[in-house]
Image (spheres, grey):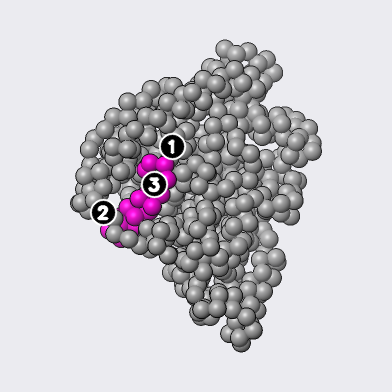
């Protein structure tokens, strides 16, 4: 079953269960075995719920036995495979951030939250369960999703299956590492500044951030409504189907006309593509990132798409300021107002110093800067909307460079001292200086994704390029709001032209 498991995406595994070629219990046992075999190396899974998952799998098998015996028809009177059970029996992982699972700890990479047990499922969890996905564990994230790499002090560094010395990205790094290592074919991920697309790029996976509001979220909208939920996956069609299941198409038959899965199966017409080589919030693109971008442009052109070099005409300094203002306000809410969630007063020792510092920056600067940040967000959205009314799709880099090494972005002793100083003595000038320095460090690598969180438009990272060291580097495509179907048609075409499903890191071949 080991080789068969790795040979199928989630849709393929669900078909094996539906046709009784394999049981749901066999699938979850393989997923658990895979976890135990590779997780010691990658540290992607931070909470296990194996016994409950095995029980759910056994109940699923019992229902299918009843169906076979004519007791009831779980798939409807005509036996059709409906979207409500489209992924029944498929093992699934939930990111340990922002998507509560009732009864399971949600630490969010933070010592303060490490004992927090939500009482209710998030909407995305409810919908995933309704689709038949079997949640058996939760994946690592940077503390409160603050960083584009996944090295929480609470759980330790999560590592990239392509090279264990390198990051899988973040903040959905645990999800991407688990999928790349073959634990599951797709896993839940969320994206407030690139946290689906960054780890997808780092781990050679497909990652689509949906349009703002496409998938219901657990909490009231945060400042700027930057976040979105979906997944990282090995196949385009898995993300397409999951988007159907999480966004309002759950009652329609799987792949019916007008669904996202049907879009992923349709031919992609020639598109007008705005080709952007600007580095956005990064100072420049590395040779690797430029090579990946040029390769993708050549491939798209060879497939009949029309590419036109375009300058975005955006003040990226203003973009940076707006994004950081909104980001720090969210941090303030999760850190300094954590008591409303956990019932316990937050204290410095329960948070990483960088998280604690940005929360205090949010408290000091956020409220006064929020109106201007929201106005800048409106202008950015207007500019990108105008551009994407003239082009079908925008092509740009996902990251400014290949996956960085573990520890490369952690605060230095000097930076940690500065962070402690500004929280003890919150002077506005010092806080602005610290925020600028810290953001320069992060954006130098991960400064190409935030624009589309501000605009709310859908964007995807597609794994088309591996560098000379064997590290994957994705490229990013964005579409107008509501344009996920266009992106999925294009992604499926690129996937067929340059298949990546069978490109596996050595760790994926680990057995138990």
| Residue that label 1 marks | 452
Alpha-carbon span between mark 2 and mark 1 = 24 Å
- Say which residue appears at 37% left-offset and 29% top-offset: 383
Considering depth in this image, is 460 or 179 the residue closer to the camera?
Answer: 460
Vertical comparison of 218 with 146: above or below: below
Alpha-carbon span between mark 3 and mark 2 = 14 Å
Instruction: Report which quarter residue 293 is drawn in.
Output: top left
Q: Are marks 3 and 1 in contact (CB under 8 Å)?
A: no
Circle 3: element type: loop
Q: Is residue 180 left or right of residue 35?
A: left
| Residue that label 2 marks | 269
Q: Are marks 2 and 1 in contact (CB under 8 Å)?
A: no
- Say which residue appears at 66% left-offset and 69% top-offset: 56
Vertical comparison of 155 with 82: above or below: above
- Say which residue appears at 32% left-offset and 38% top-offset: 389
Q: Residues in magenta? A: 479-498
Report the quarter where the C terminus lies.
Answer: bottom right
Q: Does label 3 or label 1 sit earlier along the sequence? A: 1
Q: Residues within 10 Å of mark 3 (few under 14, many from 20)?
A: some
Rendered location of residue 250, percent (x, y): 53, 60
């Amino acid at each position: 079953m080991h080789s068969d498991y790795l040979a199928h995406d989630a849709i393929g595994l669900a078909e094996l269960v539906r046709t009784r070629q394999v049981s749901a219990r066999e699938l979850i046992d393989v997923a658990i075995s895979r976890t135990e075999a590779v997780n010691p190396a990658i540290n992607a899974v931070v909470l296990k719920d194996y016994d409950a998952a095995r029980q759910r799998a056994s109940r699923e098998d019992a229902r299918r036995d009843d169906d076979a015996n004519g007791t009831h028809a779980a798939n409807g009177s005509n036996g059709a495979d409906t979207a409500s059970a489209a992924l029944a029996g498929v093992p699934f992982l939930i990111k340990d951030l922002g998507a509560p699972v009732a009864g399971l700890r949600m630490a969010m990479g933070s010592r303060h939250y490490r004992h927090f047990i939500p009482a209710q499922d998030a909407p995305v969890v409810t919908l995933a369960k309704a689709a038949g996905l079997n949640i058996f564990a939760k994946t690592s994230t940077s503390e409160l999703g603050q960083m584009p790499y996944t090295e929480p002090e609470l759980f330790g560094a999560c590592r990239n299956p392509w090279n264990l010395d390198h990051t899988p990205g973040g903040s959905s790094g645990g999800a991407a590492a688990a999928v790349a290592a073959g634990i599951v074919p797709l896993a839940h991920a969320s994206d407030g500044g690139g946290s689906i697309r960054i780890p997808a790029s780092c781990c050679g996976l497909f990652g689509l951030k949906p349009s703002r509001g496409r998938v219901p979220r657990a909490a009231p909208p945060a400042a700027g409504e930057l976040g979105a939920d979906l997944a990282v996956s090995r196949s385009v069609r898995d993300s397409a189907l999951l988007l159907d299941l999480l966004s309002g198409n759950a009652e329609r038959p799987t792949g019916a006309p007008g669904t996202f899965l049907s879009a992923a199966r349709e031919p992609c017409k020639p598109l007008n593509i705005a080709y952007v080589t600007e580095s956005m919030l990064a100072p420049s693109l590395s040779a690797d990132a430029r090579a990946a971008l040029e390769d993708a442009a050549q491939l798209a052109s060879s497939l009949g798409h029309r590419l036109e070099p375009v300058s975005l005409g955006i003040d990226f300094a203003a973009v940076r300021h707006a994004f950081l203002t909104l980001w720090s306000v969210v941090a303030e809410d999760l850190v300094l107002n954590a008591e409303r969630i956990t019932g316990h007063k937050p204290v410095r020792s329960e948070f990483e110093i960088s998280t604690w510092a940005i929360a205090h920056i949010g408290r000091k600067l956020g409220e006064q800067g929020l109106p201007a940040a929201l106005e800048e967000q409106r202008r950015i959205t207007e500019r990108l909307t105008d551009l994407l009314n003239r082009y079908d799709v925008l092509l740009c880099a996902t990251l400014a460079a290949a996956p960085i090494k573990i520890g490369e972005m952690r605060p230095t002793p000097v930076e940690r001292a500065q962070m402690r100083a500004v929280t003890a003595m919150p002077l506005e000038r010092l806080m602005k200086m610290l925020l600028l320095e810290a953001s320069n460090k992060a954006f130098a690598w991960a400064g190409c994704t935030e624009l589309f969180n501000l605009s709310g438009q859908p964007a995807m990272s597609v794994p088309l390029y591996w560098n000379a060291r064997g590290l994957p580097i994705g490229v990013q495509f964005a579409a107008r709001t509501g344009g996920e179907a266009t992106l999925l048609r294009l992604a499926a075409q690129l996937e067929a032209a340059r298949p990546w499903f069978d490109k596996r890191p050595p760790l994926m071949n680990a057995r138990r």
